[in-house]
Amino acid sequence: MRPIRLPEPPSPTLGVPEIFENGAYSVIRRAVVIGNGFPGSENQSLGLIHALGLADNHVLYRVTRPSGGINEWLRWLPVSLHKILYHIIMRICCYSRFIVSRGKKLAPLPSENGGSVGLSSILEADSKQIVNMARESYEKDGPLLVVASGRDTISIASSIKRLASEKVFLVQIQHPRSDLSRFDLVVTPRHDYYALTPQAQEQIPWIIRKWITPHETPDQHVVLTVGALHQIDFAALHSAASTWHDEFAPLPKPLLVVNIGGPTCRCRYGTELAQQLSAFLTNVLVSCGSVRISFSNRTPKKVSNIIIKELANNPKVYIWDGEEPNLYMGHLAWADAFVVTADSVSMISEACSTGKPVYVMGSERCTWKLADFHKSLRERGVVRPFTGSEDISESWSYPPLNDTAEVACRVHDVLAERGLRVRP
């Protein structure tokens, strides 16, 4: 196995002065994570909690929306308004069904709170409940750290801060597109400020410029990152290398891991990219010992079917079927190089945290701030475009992205300025 080229992560208290050591009110011992049900978003919050040393002392709450049917058209609304409209529609539908049913078997109505998506064990986010918890346990456990991520969490997270200002330290991940003073810290990638660049201004019709956010450059509330936060660090990769040793150690080297996401509004593609990717992978097989391919839950069937048809019968290629156990961490730990589709900031950020060669497929299809993200990575020498002419046995390196640890250090610094510290 080749060595994993990563810097040691900072300790949870690195750089934090030993101040207010004896005061209960100066120590943060627990955290609340407010998620939105999207793994990529929640993973950022959990990654920060892990880097701060509170992975074993946090509670996950989730802001949920009604789903199915007309709800898919209402997702652009604020959560509270969406739920009000949902209940009105449900009342109308239930009344209509009662009138017309006459004993007929009718299709089920759209479900609330995500239906059967495994939410039963996760608490529904309630600002008053979390505020009461912060107040009741303040004297014993000190202030409460609240970490939220995603648009749907903004309203509840800011309400918690407003109702329990002195008892809560609030970190909002991803730019809230609103008044930043409502949060203690906002963590967001640099490309979220792409709209302020001259290139972006040229692309925006003047009549709608005032509606494009953010409007101002980052202030003292903002911590900028290169990519997304995540839970991949030095210790996690070493643990995964040990766990997956028997599976990956015997594989012929070099091992190329291919992570395929799915099209987004800022990175559109379909079967043509799948065909191109298949051809490029076929070209580089001669320099590979093994190739492991995995799809995300966003990968369209028409894309995965082409990849499977073109490559599944090659003896060097293994295509993970998505069944448990999840091989993702093993892939990150044991890969010698990666090919990642350009749509996923999270998958690219995680691969770039390993310090191993990362080739990106389809970045020329990206627009707006996602194109700016790829441009910044190329300028840093962190990624290269995948062209199908690469010799995978030739390695290259770069300073690994270390956004999560750097943000954790910044959180420690701001807490120290306020006479606070995290004690795992």
Image: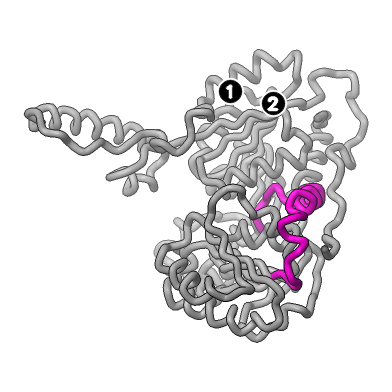
Please tell me which residue is depicted at 47% across the width and 61% down the height of the picture: 299
Left or right side of 382 for 191: left
Report the residue marked by disc 1.
130
Please tell me which residue is depicted at 53% across the width and 71% down the height of the picture: 312
Q: Is residue 382 visible?
A: no
Which quarter of the figure has residue 387?
bottom right
Please tell me which residue is depicted at 73% across the width and 53% down the height of the picture: 244
**Secondary structure beneath label 2:** strand
**The N terminus - image quarter:** bottom right
Left or right side of 161 for 10: right
Relative image position of residue 178 (x, y in whole percent) = 53, 45
Please tell me which residue is depicted at 43% across the width and 63% down the height of the picture: 300
Relative image position of residue 142 (x, y in whole percent) = 75, 20
Q: How many marks?
A: 2
Going by the numbered disc 1, the residue's amino acid type is: Ile
Disc 2: CA contacts within 10 A as few (<14), some (14-19) or many (>=20): many
Q: Is residue 397 visible?
A: yes
Going by the numbered disc 2, the residue's amino acid type is: Leu
Is 80 above or below relative to 68?
above
Q: Is residue 149 found inside the magenta-colored segment of the image? A: no
**Secondary structure beneath label 1:** helix
Separation of residues labelled 2 and 1 (CA atoms): 9 Å
> Which residues make up the magenta segment?
226-255
**The C terminus - image quarter:** top right
187 vs 250, nearest the viewer: 250
Report the residue marked by disc 2.
144
Relative image position of residue 36 (x, y in whole percent) = 51, 40
354 vs 139, nearest the viewer: 354
Relative image position of residue 41 (x, y in whole percent) = 57, 47
